Amino acid sequence: DNELVRCTLQRELPMALDGDAVPNFDLKDALTVGFCEAAAVKAGSGAKTAQPLNGEREFVRTRDTNLGQLIANSFLGATNAYQMKNEGEQVDIGIANAGGIRASIDGPDVTQCDINEAAPYNNPVVVVKVNANQLVAAMENSVCLFPLISGDGLGTGRFAQMVGVEMEFDPSEAGVCDQASVKKRSRVRSLKVKRGADYEVVVEDGAINTGGNYVIATSAYLAGAGDGYASLATGVQLGDSGVTEQQAVFSYIVDELNSYVNIEDPPASQSIKCVGSDDCKL
């Protein structure tokens, strides 16, 4: 597969593409690094995007982006068939941490190499069930450090790119990080989870509506308490979907979007909205 070889060479042997001679190397060993997995490459897919997919750090760590929503949606797509078969219920929410998004996809072509560069860690995509208090803890963790300014840019990797929820948060309130569960909200002013055509209210008027359970598709890294998501680690681990992040994104583009991505940036439908503070004007 020429695309597979080129993708591997771009990552492992950049000098080889510019010279006449290709150094001796073991292609099988090169592929094991996970950059261009044979199972994820579909020759001739012709995938396109109508506009650049925004993976720039200053944006993915502070607001919804079209690339972030694409990745989160791909997690839903990768896990719903698995979840329906094994548990008989739909996945409600897709969560990707901004720290796992490392590059934009300029387009108009979208190749497996582009996806691998944008999502290089390639964790397994897994399914977790949480209660309302655990879900709010995860949402609080996502925005607890907003809008932290570090030496090389805005934001932190724990900021979530999500689908299946609508949340408003107020960064003037105290940040609550790394909690397995919370009894009251802090920065999360309102939170709704999409259930079919409707939304179920989880946080309203400052109170958490307990009693509900929510199924989340996310990376094994977050499900293992990475980036402070302790509440996902303490939730019910429902299983591994059998696909990785890179495989999920490429399959979603090809199979669900018919190889054509058309998402505005910022997305028309936003999962996270900053309210009540001058820090929202980033």
Image (spheres, grey):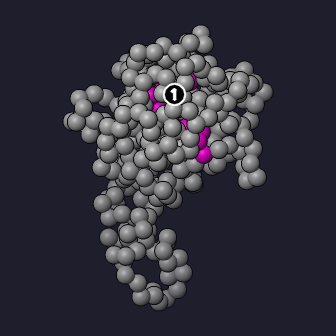
Q: Position of residue 269 (x, y in %)?
A: 53, 28
Q: State left or right for residue 143 relative to residue 217.
A: right
Magenta stretch containing residue 161, yes or no?
yes
Please tell me which residue lies in front, 2 or 117. 117
Residue 94 seen anywhere in this rendered image of the structure? no
Residue located 23% across and 29% down the image? 88
Residue located 45% across and 45% down the image? 224
Question: SS for tag 1?
Answer: loop
Label total for image: 1
Q: Position of residue 172 (x, y in %)?
A: 74, 25
Where 73 sits versus 21, above or below? Answer: above
Where 205 sits versus 132, above or below? Answer: above
Q: Residues within 10 Å of mark 1 (few under 14, many from 20)?
A: many
Query: From this viewpoint, which residue is outermost toward the left?
Result: 85
Residue that badge 1 annotates: 181
Report the span colored magenta.
157-167
Query: From this viewpoint, which residue is outermost toward the top?
Result: 205
Under mark 1, the amino acid is Ser
